[in-house]
Image (spheres, rainbow, N blue to C red):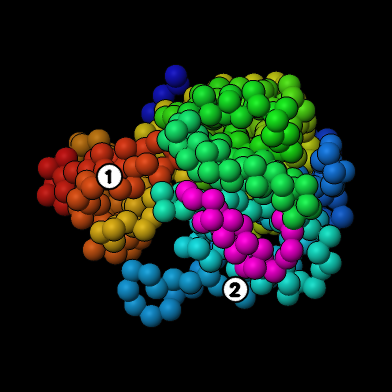
Amino acid sequence: MKQYNRRDFLKVSGTVAATSALAACGKKDNAEDIDLDPMGNHTDPVPTDKMTYRTNPKTGDKVSILGYGWMRLPTKRVGDGPNNEVIDQEQVNRLTNYALEHGVNYFDTSPAYCRGKSEESLGIALEQSGRPRDSYYIATKLSNFSPQQYSFEEGCKIFENSLQYLKTDYIDYLLLHSIGGGGMDNLRQRFLDNGLLDWLMEQREKGRIRNLGFSFHGDVTVFDYMLEHHDKYKWDFVQIQANYIDWKQAGGRNVNGEYLYTELEKRGIPAVIMEPLLGGRLSKVPDHVVAHLKQRKPENSVASWAFRYIGSKPNVLTVLSGMTYMEHLEDNVRTYSPLEPLTEEEQAWLEGETAALIKSYPTIDCNDCKYCMPCPYGLDIPGIFVHYNKCVNKGNIPESQQAENYKQARRAFLVGYDRAVPRLRQADHCTTCRECVPHCPQNIDIPRELRRVDEFVEKLKQNTL
């Protein structure tokens, strides 16, 4: 695996500057006219009529290849306290209107997202858009995660509540949420032994569910079981985690995306893709990786490589992205308006050399999904990990006091930590209760990683690194 020293970094940084300057001349590799600023960013209008669509083979639905994930919504502060952030519905409405105007028509939510407020927010946003109900597709999930929700009655209640919050009388794409965690015993308790899956299949027959599928994380035995019984369940789609890191080098209890995708493709089951950016980690990469990508296409964003990679797979129905800010939405719409498929050589370059370069950095595999929250002791677990990963990518994790940038990195980490995570919610308050661990789709040993972050922070504070 290639390692970079300071001389290498200056060399590739110079390459970034040079390629950015070339991009500013306003030419692509194919010599088409484009408008770029001095950093190589697009300044021309985002297309409104060039979105790429994929066809659902069962229903004929023309689904935008860019799907809007309703997990990471913009928030605003109201008052004090650890739970003082609420969804900024005005901003959400603005993002929704922009997405619809630019061809996005698939919206993915769950009763478990945004502290239980995601579905309600999406229902409001779609209603205020004034668009006909048949002009967009709503995907939501049967998120019966706690044992108190495993009964048939509770499962039905969750589904009926979803219809109410989403202001609709049918769901276009309904998923059994995150099966695989807990293995076959958990699957049986949640959906099989209680008759809930049979009931959902009945709702599909009645038209209250147009497409029935599941999202998968964890034990591949569960995934294989569900596909072995495809003749019985007739899955209309399946949601999997896939990106150019996970395609061949999935970590933790995740399964290689290549295997999951291929098994679906064999059976003609469309794949919906989650975590194309690994919770943003494939857009917030170290400068070395930025240089590595910019050498190829200086005018393209770092994130666009990940979206083009997974969108180039023909059996992908849509690719979900949790777009918190307008610039995220604009960039992703541009990438898929229309999609420029990657060549086989480019795909291999991302899966191999690029993936290896990214994995050489010691980030924590947190996707900021917030499934571990709320912490019973008030910790901001994803906030801690996001800050740590950011500092890894910025080179602010010195190995010792002898590091060339030790003083600068020490101050950047400690000051940024206090700004990003309130003192009472930092890693030193973890009691190792482990209540968070079963909920992590990435199988992170959260208490162990929190302890590692806390030990690093203490060494920085005491100047004993």
Q: Toward which corner of the image does residue 243 lie, by quadrant?
A: top right
Q: Toward which corner of the image does residue 319 lie, by quadrant?
A: top right
Q: Where is residue 407 in the image (x, y as percent from the top left)?
A: 24, 48
Per the image, the residue denoted by label 2 is: 89
Task: Report the residue that reaches farthest toward the bottom.
Answer: 79
Asked whether residue 157 is drawn in magenta, I would say yes
Q: Relative to residue 129, is residue 119 depicted above or below? A: above
Amino acid of disc 2: Gln
Question: Which numbered disc, 1 or 2, marks the residue that appears first in the sequence?
Answer: 2
Which mark is nearer the camera, 1 or 2?
Answer: 1
Dividing the image into 4 quarters, which one contains the C terminus? top left
Per the image, the residue denoted by label 1 is: 434
The local secondary structure at tag 2 comes to: helix
Binning the other alpha carbons within 10 Å of mark 1 as few (below 14), some (14 to 19) or many (20 upward) gives some
For the residues labelled 1 and 2, the Cα–Cα distance comes to 34 Å
Task: Look at the image and give the residue range highlighted in magenta.
Answer: 150-173
Q: Residue at x 53, y 29 (%)?
A: 222
Q: Is residue 362 left or right of residue 432?
A: right
